[in-house]
Image: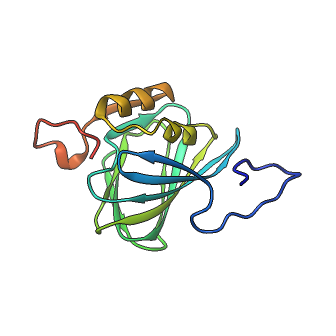
Amino acid sequence: MATTLAADAPYLLNQGEGTPMSWFNAAMTLKASTPQIGVVEISISPGDEPPLHVHSRESEWFYVLDGRATFHIGDKTFSGGPGAFVSLPKGIPHTFTVDSATARLILLNAPGGFERMFELAPKTVEDAVNALRRYGVEVVGPHPREKSSSGARPS
């Protein structure tokens, strides 16, 4: 199954097709990875969201396919369900909260490359922080729901 966009090699991936990857218990499916763009389909539940972090290289965009999510971007908060689209410019601390039992999202990042971080399949906080750091992403705080507790689990 192809997962690299190429001008001379069109392809189609149906739902569920692509390269499987993970982040804690979330299922990530790589759909495209080029120097220009990365595309990942995410199936995630509450508690598996990333901590508050900042990208130094790429901007991100999320499209909500199923479920509901709240996006925390700098001092702004946006909530949306199916069909919602949100922009997360590089250099601004951000994360998101899954507000439903599960959510399915499309993540686009440009330039490409960061999407490969999910191949590292972190399962612990230390692994996640190291994986993010390896791709030029700095963890700047816990997930908003963790701010009142002492835990720093990417939740």
The structure's colour scheme is: rainbow
Single out the residue that lies furthest toward the left. 149
Locate residue 152 relative to residue 126 in the image: left or right: left
The answer to which of 5 and 71 lies nearer the viewer is: 5
Q: Quadrant of residue 15?
A: bottom right
Q: Residue at x 85, y 51 (%)?
A: 7
Number of numbered callouts drawn: 0
- Spot occupied by residue 31 in the image (x, y as percentages of width and height): 63, 54
Picture coordinates of residue 44, whole percent (x, y): 38, 58
Task: Measuring from the top left, give residue 88's x and y in whole percent.
Answer: 47, 49
**Residue 113 location, quadrant:** top right
Give the left or right position of residue 119, taking residue 48 as reference.
right
Q: Is residue 16 left or right of residue 73?
A: right
Residue 118 in view (yes/no): yes
In front of the other: 145 or 44: 44
For residue 66, above or below residue 152:
below
Q: Residue 130: percent from the left, percent from the top?
A: 40, 26
Q: Is residue 73 visible?
A: no
Which residue is nearer to you in this view: 145 or 119?
Answer: 119
* Residue sitting nearer the eye, 54 or 101: 101
Please give the name of the residue rendered at 73% of the width and 47% of the height, measured from the top-left corner. Answer: 4
Quadrant of the image for the N terminus? bottom right
Q: Look at the picture and state if 81 lies above or below 43.
A: below
Q: Please give the name of the residue rendered at 28% of the width and 65% of the height, measured from the top-left corner.
A: 99
Q: Residue furthest right?
A: 8
Q: Residue at x 38, y 69 (%)?
A: 80
Considering only vertical position in the picture, is 152 above or below 38?
above
